[in-house]
Image (cartoon, helix red, strand yellow):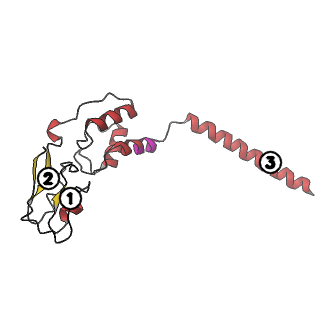
Amino acid sequence: MWTPVLTAILIITAIALAAGLLLSIASGRLPSDSNSVIGKVDALLPQTQCAQCGYPGCRPYAEAIVSGEAAINLCPPGGDATIQRLAELLGREPEPLADPATTVAGVAIIDESRCIGCTHCRNACPVDAITGAHQYMHTVIRSECTGCELCIAPCPVDCISMVLAA
């Protein structure tokens, strides 16, 4: 009575073990998933989503780097440190920042006498460098500002400008 049941269990176990062994061997021999490399590259980027690299955010830029469509030196907020980490991860030579004119030479400032406290700039800032409550004056935390200029366009009273970083 138990013999057919035990035989079936042993056969199913043997099949499962063989399938597991074959899958293990196949995963070791097949090339790694490019999504994992994309994820690692994306994790090294500063996540400012500032689009200064020419891509709408850090993830699309990471995908372009892995596919070979983009160079590793297009991220001004990340600077040389990010370029170095990307070069090490991908086994490439580090390069200087692509266009020195796009480096963060400035930071945003808010003319506080003209600020109406609408929070449009604060909501647009990808790094939370703007502080202030609704209907109250806002200010920029200079040490946090990446110079992406994403806060300028949404300002309805044009009270935001860029100045040279100190």
Above or below, comparing residue 73 to residue 11 in the picture? above
| Residue 11: image tag | 3
Numbered disc 3: secondary structure:
helix
Q: Is residue 83 above or below residue 49?
A: above
Kind of residue at badge 2: Ala
- Characterize the local packing of mark 3: few (<14), some (14-19) or many (20 or more) Cα atoms within 10 angstroms: few
Dot 2: what SS?
strand
Relative to 81, residue 35 above or below:
below
Question: Of marks 2 and 3, which one's residue comes earlier in the chain?
Answer: 3
* Residue 94 point in image, percent of width and height: 30, 29
Instruction: Tell us which disc is closer to us: 2 or 3.
Output: 2
Give the CA distance from mark 1 to mark 2: 9 Å
For the stretch drawn in magenta, what is the main secondary structure?
A: helix
Residue indicated by mark 2? 108
Mark carried by residue 36: none
Question: In front here: 16 or 84?
Answer: 84
Q: Report the magenta residues as a range.
A: 33-39
Q: In this view, does 30 lie to the left or right of 116?
A: right
Residue 95 coordinates in the image, percent (x, y):
26, 30
Q: Can residue 71 be seen in this view?
A: no
Separation (CA) of disc 2 from disc 3:
70 Å
Is any atom of residue 108 visible in this view? yes
The answer to whether 5 appears left or right of 93 in the picture is right
Which residue of the protein is positioned furthest toward the top in this rendering?
Answer: 93
Question: Which badge, 1 or 2, is on the more N-terminal residue?
Answer: 2
From the image, tell me which residue sits under label 1. Answer: 130
Estimate the spatial distance between the alpha carbons at disc 3 and disc 1, rounded to whole Å: 65 Å
Indicate the quadrant containing the N terminus: top left, top right, bottom left or bottom right: bottom right
Q: In this view, does 39 lie to the left or right of 19?
A: left
Q: Tags 1 and 2 in contact by the CB under 8 Å rule?
A: yes
80 or 9: nearer the viewer: 80
The answer to if 36 sits in the magenta stretch is: yes
